[in-house]
Structure formats: structure tokens, C-alpha cells
Amino acid sequence: MRFEQQGSRLLILEGNSQLWIDPWGEDSVRIRMTQETQMDANDWALSEPVAEIRPEIRFEEVDITDPWYRGAEWAQYHRTGTQVTYTNGKLTVRVSPEGWLSFYNQKGELLTEEYWRNRNRLNRYSTSLRISSRVLKPIPGTSDYALTARFEAFPGEKIFGMGQYQDQRLDKKGSVLELSPRNSQSCVPFYVSSRGYGFLWNNPAVGQVVFGENRTEWTIRSTRKMDYYITCGDTPAEIEAHYSAATGRTPMMPEYGMGYWQCKLRYRTQEELLSVAREHKRRGLPMDAIVVDFFHWTRQGDYKFEPLDWPDPDAMVKELREMGIETVVSVWPTVDEKSENYAEMADRGYLVRTDRGNDVSTWMGAAVYFDATNPGTQKFVWDRCRENYYAKGIRCFWLDEAEPEYNDYEFDNYRYWAGPALQCANLYSVGYAKGFYEGLRAAGEKEILSLIRCAWAGSQKYATLVWSGDVCSSFRSMREQLQCGLSMAMAGIPWWTCDLGGFMGGDSTDPGFRELLVRWFAWGCFLPVFRMHGERCPWHEREQEYRNGVRQMSSGRDNEVWSFGEENTPILSRYLFIREKLRPYVRRLMKDAHETGAPVMRPLFYDFPEDPEAAATEDCYMFGPDLLVAPVMEAGVTERTLYLPKGAVWKDAYTGKILEGGQKVTVPAPIDVIPVMIRDGAEIEIYDQPSA
């Protein structure tokens, strides 16, 4: 084992293995390891320039009689060893004489450390298990490695973040998480620990993490290096600020993104979409965006309107803009084999390759996926969309199928420009968003937003609004979306939304579904983006129509605020106006996200990290610093019990009652009310008049 200092870098060298420790922004370090002669050059999520910092590096000969090492078997053979301390601001990395790492804050408190269980090792956990913290195991016949990295587990530690997983666990301690993308799943491998540190697994490869009670273990099936980043801070806000500085901050949200978005399974024709927008405005209801969803095109991969259904898109966009409504157009990464662009894209290597067989989607035509990791693909697709959409005034795009949604998620079968999918599958959605972001910027746009179904670490810098995919219409699913949004926020993705009412299975004539929709819609008013969507059953019946051999997509049932019963129309309409009243507050939250990386919605832990009960609360959240929101996520209830964090005074926005923090309270929650608590006298009006 040898230690070398090269400028600000500390190298730990042993045989063919080299481990690098670098300062990476304020109070932060980056740890990389390889067994090759050269370190893989990919920065992945850590793409942003950070300030050059000179860490304090101290080499110290430690006496084996120190209580830290007393009694170790190692003491029989050596009297001293070299220990290194590497300090960047508030974060110190202590490197033992044998090379294992521990991370401390400026108070000398242990944050986390690597998991070593080796015999004759100079550490407090000396055993005969022969388990190392980090293992790069060569894959025979290749230059690739299977990777395992292990860290100690600590009783009572809570873990917030990691992206979007369809379960009900906000605290990821005890979870097993797949490090791969799927429809409704986004792996964003950054988390904030209740112990006062943030951790990024900076590797887009397919794998798994286990946050066990006995240890945390990251495993990767195929990679070239180990790469992770650790930061610390006195508050979660400070940790998020460090992380977002290193991976990129979200732009400022365009004004149209802060209001209400209207969409459904699909508006089948130009006239159908315009009639909804006109009726919305006739009723005096606010709307900021409306969506032209999938299969409005001639063929998948053509990236242009079908003229039979959309005869004059220029006039449509102009009329909508005169009504103050932004037009959003869906783009898919599927390219039909009969598309006008297929031959050129195939010839240029812009399509995803497979190692065995073909992965062809046969839904609504035979199509394959384009390779979004290829810069050439990104430019080619944007150029087609610029010609056929942007030139008509469309500047907001819905980037669907961004995982992408293969027939089988067999990642060992796919190859991208960036490498084997096993090594880079999580980069697909990043490249997809990047192509549109850079295209829009080059066209002169300064306010950019793309709705997308998947993300990875760093996606936020490409103006991505992530939604949670095709989820079910049920109260259980609604509860799962709450933790999805909060986990995405803590993972550094501040723009998030979901399909209000769920996407699949909602019968718009069923009273039970109507209750769910009303509750979910009210919650949507307090999400970063307020957006209606869903297929809604039963679909409108129509004869199956074919064009050029492709069956045409039908239109889902009506999905406007007046579509769910006369008794519910006033309730849903009410929340459109509440959102308008909240617009100045939402604008402030979006500015904070842009400037500091602060999440828009966040667990109570974020604002009240010293309150253990707040950290344990998973059924309500903070919408910015001033509003506590408690969605109603059960059928048939008329009141809601919630926890008010201590250290603040709260006002029930509905009743006007003043309540002290540090207690659980039960508040009224009739069908037209979502409980919202206003913190410390903040002047935010929600309901028109407090009830007696």
C-alpha cells in the first residue's frame, strides 16, 4: 500500500489498483477507483465546473498503542503505519494505514465509512471474514469489471432520495433498489442522510443497491471504474446546494409551467383540442398549457402532424397563444420501419442495436428505438422537430418513452453509442432531454421546459419536468406517487409531477373514481407542476380505422374539469383559482430551485432536520418553506390527522385555527378541502374565507 499526493489529489496505490480522492466543490470529495493503467475519463453526472480548492492533506505515522488500534493482530508485526487525513472544508476523509476510508464532519462526527471485514487488518472491525469494501472483479475475456462497494450501516439512519420507485417507502433504509430505468421508475442515485451527508453513486450502469441494516451494498454488473461523490453540510439545504452545484442546477421555470396543464390520453384532432381550450376559456377557467399527445403524427419517427387530423397547426398554435395557452407536443423515440427517416437513421447508426434478435415494437406499427445517447441522433431528431414543430411556434415538448420502454428490459442485449446498455442504460433519458435543451437554446429560446418520463442524476440541468409514468388509478398508487415526488426532489430533481387521478383504470363514470380524482386533483394544486392526465375508461367507441396499414389510435374519454359530475365541477374549478393565487409563491420556489438547488416539494425532514418526528413523517410534506400539505389518500374520510413540526406556529388554511408545532392534530377534510398548514404567519391566501 502506497500513498502519493499529486497536487490536490491523493492516490492510494496497491498492485494494479489505484484510488483517487479529489476535492469536488465546497465540503465535498469525489472517490474513483480503477484497476486499469488509466482512469476512465467519464464524469457522468459530475459535469459542472467546480471551484479549485486546495484541501489540507496530512500524513501521520500512527502508534499502534493508540486506543484506536490497540489489540489489533496487526500490532504483532508492525509498530507504526501511515494514516492520511484529507480535509476539504467541513468534510474530512480519514484514510487508514491499510487504505479504507472514513468520512467525518467539522465536529469530528463520523458520517459514514467503508465496510471492511478482513483478518490482520488495522481496523476496529477486524475479523476473519475477508470481506473488502470495494471489489472490481474482472469479467473474463473483456476489459470490464463487476463492481461491489460496501459501506457501514448505522442504527437510526434515514435515507432520503434515490429517485422514483413505485413503493410506499420515503425513508429508503431497508430497501432494495434496482439501478435501472423502467416505465414509472427513475434511478437517480443521490441521497441525503439524516447523519448529515449526501452521497451520489456516479455510475449510470445497471445494478442494485441494498440499504441493509447490517451494511449498504452497491453492485454493478459491468463497468470500468468505481465513482462516487460525498458532501456534507449543517442542513439538508446546504447538502442539496453542494450537490446541485456539482451536477447542475435547473433553469428558471417558464411562467406557463407554473399554472394549470390540461391533457388526456389524446386529443385526436385539431378541432377536438381547440374546442376544449375554447370551452375552458368560455367558462373563465385558467389554463396555461394543453397537450397534443401521441399518435398525432403520420408515422412514428416522422416527427410531424398528420394533416388529415391536424390541417393547420400554425393557426392552432396561434389561436392557443392568443388565449394564453402554450401548445405542448409529444415526441416518442420510436421509429417505424416505414418512416421517412428510418433508412437515414439506420445508415448513420442512430438506432439502438441489439446483440441478439431484434427488439421491435409492434404496437401501432413496427418500430425500433433511436439511440438518444448519440449526439448525432440528438441533433438529427431535433432538426426534424425544429422543421415540423418549432417552426410552427411549438417550443415545449413531451419526451415520452424515455427509458426507453423495451418489450423486455434485458439490458445485456442492447448497445448504445455511449457503450453497452449494461454500462450506461441510465444515460438514455439524459441524452434525450439534452438534445432538445441544446436545440432550443441554439434556436434562441431562453425559457425551456421538456416533460419527460425518466431521469438520472444531472437531468435537472436540461430543464426536465419528470412525471411518474403510467401509474394506476387507486388510492394506493396516489400514496406511492407522494413518496415518488419527495424522493425525486431529494435526489435533486425539483420539477416533478404525476398524472392526476392516475393513468390506468380510472372509470370516469364510477363514483369511487370520481372521489379519487377530486382528492388527487386537489393535491396536484400543490405539486411543482399542476397537470391533469389519464386514459379514462371506458374509451370512446369508434370503428377501427387504418391508414397506410397502421391502426389509428382512439381518443380516451373526456378528462376536463367538467367531466366528472356536476357536483365535482365547482370543486375542481376552485383549485384552478387556488393555483393562480399561489402563482407568486410558486414563482419564488422555482427561483430558489434555480439559484440554490432547493427542492420545491420536500419531506418535513428537509426544513426540520432536528425534529425526529418530522423525519419519521411520510404522509405529508412541505411545499416550499411556508406550506405543509397533507393529501387525503383514503376513500370515505372527512378528517385528517397530521404532525406539525416543532419550532413553528401553524395556521390551518381552511379553518383559520392557530396551532402550536410539536404535536399531532386532527383537522377537517371534507371532499372539497385538502388540509394545508401555513407556517409562522406567512401571508399566503389559499381558501377564500376561513370557516368558523
Image (cartoon, rainbow, N blue to C red):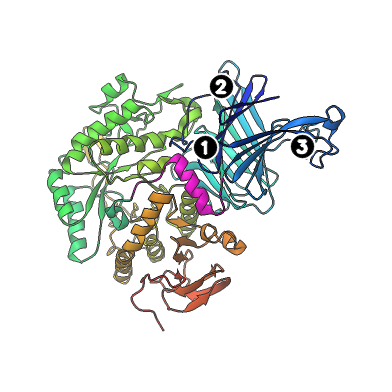
The residue nearer to you, when weighing 685 against 567, is: 685
Image position of 337 (left or right of 79): left
SS at mark 3 in the image? loop
Image position of 251 (left or right of 182): left
C-alpha gap between disc 2 and disc 1 = 32 Å
Task: Please tell me which residue is depicted at 50% across the width and 63% down the height of the picture.
Answer: 620
- Residue underneath mark 3: 123
Q: Residues within 10 Å of mark 3 (few under 14, many from 20)?
A: many
The first of marks 2 and 1 along the sequence is: 1
SS at mark 2 in the image? loop
Say above or below: 154 vs 508: above
Image position of 557 (left or right of 105): left
**x then y, percent, for residue 419:** 45, 24
Instruction: Inspect the magenta stretch and tell me whether residue 246 lies in it.
Output: yes
Three-letter code, disc 2: Asp
C-alpha gap between disc 1 and disc 3 = 30 Å
C-alpha gap between disc 2 and disc 3 = 31 Å
Q: Residues within 10 Å of mark 2 (few under 14, many from 20)?
A: some
Say above or below: 526 vs 429: below
The first of marks 2 and 3 along the sequence is: 3
Say above or below: 652 vs 28: below
- Residue underneath mark 1: 53
**x then y, percent, for residue 550:** 26, 35
**x then y, percent, for residue 363:** 34, 36
Q: Which residues are drawn in magenta?
A: 232-252
**Residue 570 circle label:** none
